[in-house]
Amino acid sequence: MRFLAKLFLVLLSVNVYAQTIRVGTGLYAPPFEMQADRQKNMYGFDIELMQEICQRAGWRCQFKGMLFEQLFTELKDNTIDLAISAISITSERQKNFLFSLPYMASGAQFLTKSQSPINTILDIRNQRVGIERGTVFKQMLQAQYQDAIDISEYATQQDVLNALSNEEIDAALIDTGAAQYWVVNNSGSFKAIGESLPVGIGYGIMANQSRQDLIATVNRQLLAMENDGAYLKLYSRYFGALRL
């Protein structure tokens, strides 16, 4: 009984003194993050990856879903400690934030309705293209097409897809993993156009520049997950059937 009592006290002290980390995530961008129920519990590749990191680091992590563009402002305001939501690591973002090691290749791909006459990237010219606000896709489109396309920005990826379904736009530019998810899981409603377009140097977990301690811990856990096979197992479960 004494041993059990001591063990209980040890476990209790670990729980009490575990560092609480506030993690910002997007609201809805399958397969990276999705809302599981009305209680706003989240699941998805990014969510499970972060949960595993938190468990290994001994952190008590609290997830907070928000619009993608809010991840950056809430980090600056210190209302969250880390952000994960298929965030591409770019030189511009690195001027203001710290990033973990890349945990996945980052890319973007055009998506259209399956019956669309658009079949190649060249066909995108003079079309209406929807993107999620806060992503780097607007700059990509402007650099590639200048004024030869009409860009519409939406608050969420779901809003972009709804606009595509309702023919308010002709094509969407979203993360490659998300584009392939919708091609495979939406009963033939959508098709991907062209190959994946490179964006940044990979997806990373983001923190304020003053939180080198958090990023160092995240990097240690990412490397450990790679070494023991946990990362590959998780990646295969979410992306194994997709064409990336």
Image: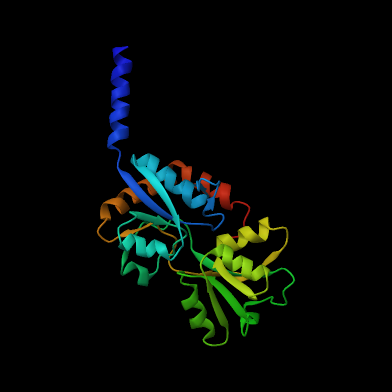
Residue 106 in the image, given as x and y percentages of width and height: 49, 63
User: Which corner quadrant of the image does residue 109 belong to?
Assistant: bottom right
Say if 76 sits above or below 54 in the image: below
User: Which corner quadrant of the image does residue 66 belong to?
Assistant: bottom left
- Asked whether residue 12 appears in the rendered view, the answer is yes
Q: The N terminus lies in which quarter of the figure?
A: top left
- Asked whether residue 225 appears in the rendered view, the answer is no
Q: Residue furthest top?
A: 1
At 69% from the left and 77% from the top, the residue drawn is 118
Q: How many marks?
A: 0
At 48% from the left and 52% from the top, the residue drawn is 46
Q: The C terminus lies in which quarter of the figure?
A: bottom right
> Image check: 218 left or right of 114?
left
Q: Residue furthest bottom?
A: 147
Residue 233 in the image, given as x and y percentages of width and height: 52, 44
At 48% from the left and 82% from the top, the residue drawn is 143
> Image check: 104 left or right of 176?
left
Residue 203 in the image, given as x and y percentages of width and height: 44, 60
Say if 127 sits above or below 175 in the image: below
Q: Residue furthest right?
A: 115
> Image check: 35 left or right of 222?
right
Residue 70 in the image, given as x and y percentages of width and height: 41, 63
At 53% from the left and 88% from the top, the residue drawn is 147
The figure's colour scheme reads: rainbow
Q: Residue furthest left?
A: 210
Q: Front-most of 150 and 154?
A: 154
Say if 112 sits above or below 85 in the image: below
